[in-house]
Amino acid sequence: MTSKMTKSKRTPGPWEIRGMGPNFLIDARTEGSSYTIGWFKDAISMKGKRLEHCANARLIAAAPELLEALEAIVDAGYLEGAYQPTVDLALAAIAKARGEA
């Protein structure tokens, strides 16, 4: 297990979805500034994919908090003694989020 995992370099959260019309953005707001992380264009015209695009947007917007939670669980040793495949999944997800995989 790692000790105190290094934080990844990324735009800090929280990230939020702005607008849910045909076009919507995922923005990060920090100290009065807003940064666009990503956008979905013409989501309504995607032939039945709108609900899928909305679900994807919610998952992307939650990414900073999900990564932070997983890092905290690993750092706290909550996975110690867990099945190794679970530990491997957690570490692989963190590495992927950091661009290390």
Image (tube, rainbow, N blue to C red):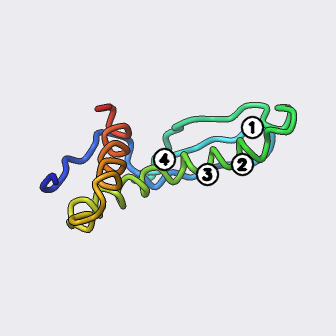
Q: CA distance from mark 4 to mark 3?
A: 13 Å
Residue 89 image point, x, y percent: 36, 48
Q: CA distance from mark 2 to mark 1?
A: 7 Å
Which residue is located at x 45 percent, y 52 percent? 32
Whether label 1 touches label 3, CB < 8 Å: no
Q: Earlier in the sequence, mark 1 or mark 3?
A: 1
- Residue tagged by mark 1? 23
Closer to the camera in the image, 33 or 44: 44
Residue 94 position (above or below residue 41): below
Left or right of 26, for residue 99: left
- Residue tagged by mark 3? 58
Residue 51 image point, x, y percent: 77, 47
**Secondary structure found at label 3:** helix
Q: CA distance from mark 4 to mark 1?
A: 17 Å
Left or right of 28, for residue 51: right
Count of number-bearing discs? 4
Q: Residues within 10 Å of mark 1 (few under 14, many from 20)?
A: few
Whether label 2 touches label 1, CB < 8 Å: yes
Amino acid type of disc 4? Ala
Direction left: furthest residue: 3
Q: For residue 7, which numbered disc appears in the image?
A: none
Left or right of 41, for residue 75: left
Amino acid type of disc 1? Asn
- Residue tagged by mark 2? 19
Whether label 2 touches label 4, CB < 8 Å: no
Q: Earlier in the sequence, mark 4 or mark 3?
A: 4
Q: For residue 28, which numbered disc appears in the image?
A: 4
Q: Earlier in the sequence, mark 3 or mark 2?
A: 2
**Secondary structure found at label 1:** loop
Q: Nearer the viewer, mark 1 or mark 3?
A: 3
Q: CA distance from mark 1 to mark 3?
A: 14 Å
